[in-house]
Amino acid sequence: MPLTIVRNDITKMEVDAIVNAANESLLGGGGVDGAIHAAAGPGLLAECRKLKGCRTGDAKITGGYNLPAKYVIHTVGPIYRNGKRGERELLISCYRKSLELAKANEVESIAFPLISAGVYGYPKQEAFDIAVSVIREFLTENDMTVYLVVFDPDVLAISKGQFSEIREYISDAQVRRQMQLDRERRRGMQQMHAQSIALPRAAAEKKAPAKPANLSEWLARSDESWRSMLFRCIDERQLSDPAVYRKANIDRRLFSKIRSNENYQASKPTVLALALALELPREEIDELLMKAGYALSDSNTFDLIIAYFIDRGEYDVMKINEALFSFDQSLLGNL
């Protein structure tokens, strides 16, 4: 998907480029910087020596050497002091310059660490918010798959209060589900008892539903496909394709497959992301899912988190993905 959050070792990311949170010398250091130099081997350091350093807020590119990535983009984040010395502007520049450099080198996939959020002391949630904001702005005009490599779930913009609300929502739904199962179990036992003392005449006399006379009649009775409903909703809202797939956090190539292939079967996260991008009400989301062969379940954590946001009229796919990440669930998008 265009922007996704992952827990991973950035040196093992199989992407076109990884971003190194470097110091101004570009000669290696601790943390992510040291790990990248160690994994890349001495060739990286030798090339970095030729670059003659890098200013804070700027970015420079080298080869990836022993890394899975073809390139390493080195950017120097600001040291956080009090937030009043241009730190925000410099951090924004780190992401923008790195993305521009990636685009200039025809990079299709790139992985970022959370720049300046380690020993440089930038408040983690603020650093995360800036990263997401700049990357999303870039992706409104460009096609690129961007990974944000995050290890600490507390970094995310989802507040502790909302985390607790979602956890309570999930717990309440699970209790309701168990009560419903208990009621159905009791009802089933009552029905079995009634059937055991009644004459089994009704089942024998019940007529089978009339079958369609031919295929044409069957097709005439069938409803629109999930694709047809999707594109009808897009047309009704007078939206462009790019506006929809970017808001859904899926890439242009996947959306093109959906648009061109009438038999395309998308994954549940993709169908949900598109429904949320269209800001469909719950009943229409359920209908679109049903047409695609899916449903939201009240016994599944992923589904319950989605339902939590839909019930509150919150359709921001990235915000929902932050919550899903916090609960160790798969993310919405082109999966």
Image (spheres, rainbow, N blue to C red):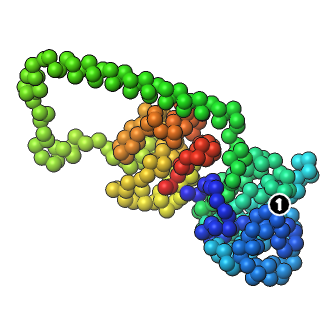
Compared to 110, does 228 lie above or below? above
Q: Quadrant of the N terminus?
A: bottom right
The amino acid at mark 1 is: Gly
Residue 6 is drawn in which quadrant? bottom right
> Which residue does the numbered mark 1 point to in the structure image?
77
Q: Is residue 237 in sight in this rendering?
A: no
Expressed as whole percent of the image width and height from the top left, the position of residue 312 reads 57, 30
Residue located at (30% from left, 20% from top): 187
Left or right, residue 189 beside residue 229: left
Left or right of residue 195, residue 166 in this image: right
Q: Is residue 256 above or below residue 230?
A: below
Q: Report the front residue among 325 and 218.
A: 325
* Residue 156 appears in view: yes
Query: Closer to the camera, 329 or 213?
Result: 329
Q: Residues within 10 Å of mark 1 (few under 14, many from 20)?
A: many
Residue 105: percent from the left, percent from the top? 67, 74
Q: Choose between 230 and 206: the one closer to the eye.
A: 206
Element assignment for label 1: loop
* Number of callouts: 1
Q: Quadrant of residue 114?
A: bottom right
State the residue at coordinates (62%, 66%).
Answer: 13
Judge whether 108 appears above or below 136 on screen.
below
Query: Where residue 243 sits: x, y (%)?
Result: 55, 50
Residue 162 point in image, percent of width and height: 66, 34
Q: Residue at x 37, y 21 (%)?
A: 183
Q: What residue do we see at 10% from left, 43% from top?
A: 213
Q: Quadrant of residue 10?
A: bottom right
In this image, 102 relative to 295: left or right? right
